[in-house]
Image (cartoon, helix red, strand yellow):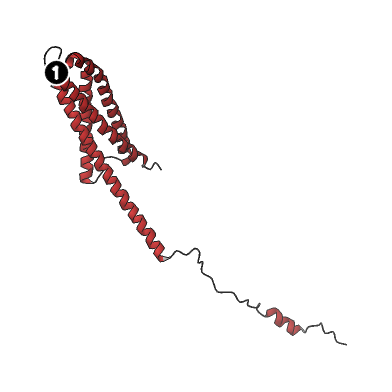
Amino acid sequence: MTNQDDTPPMQEERAAGSPPPVVPTAPPINDVENQTPSHARTTGTGIGVGGILRRWKREDLLRRGSLALRGLALVFSLLAFIIMASNKHGHGNNFDEYEEYRYVLAIAILATLYTVLQSFRHARELSTGREMSQRRTSALADFIGDQIMAYLLISSSSSAIPLTNRMREYQNNLFTDAVASAISMAFLAFVALALSALISSYKLSTQSYI
């Protein structure tokens, strides 16, 4: 009786040497969710270019505004210096006889020199398109300089106002009018430099420190 489970040797060798069956695979499916349409890529590029252009315009506007404010501070400081220095009308009506008025004159001179240098630097940078120092260093110097000069201007004006009010109680002449005009010019110079300090602080805050 023959065993039906026995396999002839030739059939075993043929079965062992045959390649494994090929399993059909599905065609690759494109990742629809992660695809970026062409119009989306174009729109993103447009937004990036528009953002850069807006930032350049904003920076140019800030530079021009800062230059204009420093120019105004220069004019007001120079007027305060000229009015106070020429305010001499005899004994008791000379500015150099009062410490408060000498302080106003000294700060007006410092503010004039500071605004001349700053206005020249900013005007040159705008005309040439090149910065004289690193942007971060320039923003820090502008911020500190504007803050110091604004404080000195308001300090000198505040110290001279009480004396001027007392003098006007018993005399109101050309001397007191000139003093009041010089104090007003110093205060306007303070306002201009205070606004310039705000611009400087904004420029400093937008600098990258990485």
At a point 20% along the width and 15% down the height, the residue shown is 169
Secondary structure, mark 1, is loop
- Number of residue marks: 1
Where 173 sits versus 19, above or below? above
Residue reaching furthest left? 90
Q: Residue under label 1, please give it.
A: 173
Where 63 sits versus 181, above or below? below
Task: Please state if 85 lies on the left or on the right of 4 as rendered.
Answer: left
Residue reaching furthest front? 169
Residue reaching furthest top? 91
Q: Nearer the viewer, residue 80 or 178?
A: 178
Q: Nearer the viewer, residue 158 or 112?
A: 158
- The quarter of the picture where residue 65 lies is top left
Task: Please state if 207 lies on the left or on the right of 187 as rendered.
Answer: right
At a point 27% along the width and 28% down the height, the residue shown is 149
- The quarter of the picture where residue 151 lies is top left
Residue 47: x and y in percent read: 36, 56
Q: Crowdedness of circle 1 by 10 Å Cα count: few (<14), some, many (20+)?
A: few
Task: Look at the image and tell me in which quarter the N terminus lies.
Answer: bottom right
At a point 26% along the width and 31% down the height, the residue shown is 191
Task: Look at the image and tell me in which quarter the C terminus lies.
Answer: top left
Residue 165: x and y in percent read: 23, 18
Q: Amino acid at mark 1?
A: Asn
Residue 8: x and y in percent read: 77, 84
Residue reaching furthest bottom? 1
Task: Please state if 4 lies on the left or on the right of 72 as rendered.
Answer: right
- The quarter of the picture where residue 98 lies is top left
At a point 28% along the width and 40% down the height, the residue shown is 133
Residue 11: x and y in percent read: 74, 84
Q: Nearer the viewer, residue 78 or 162?
A: 162
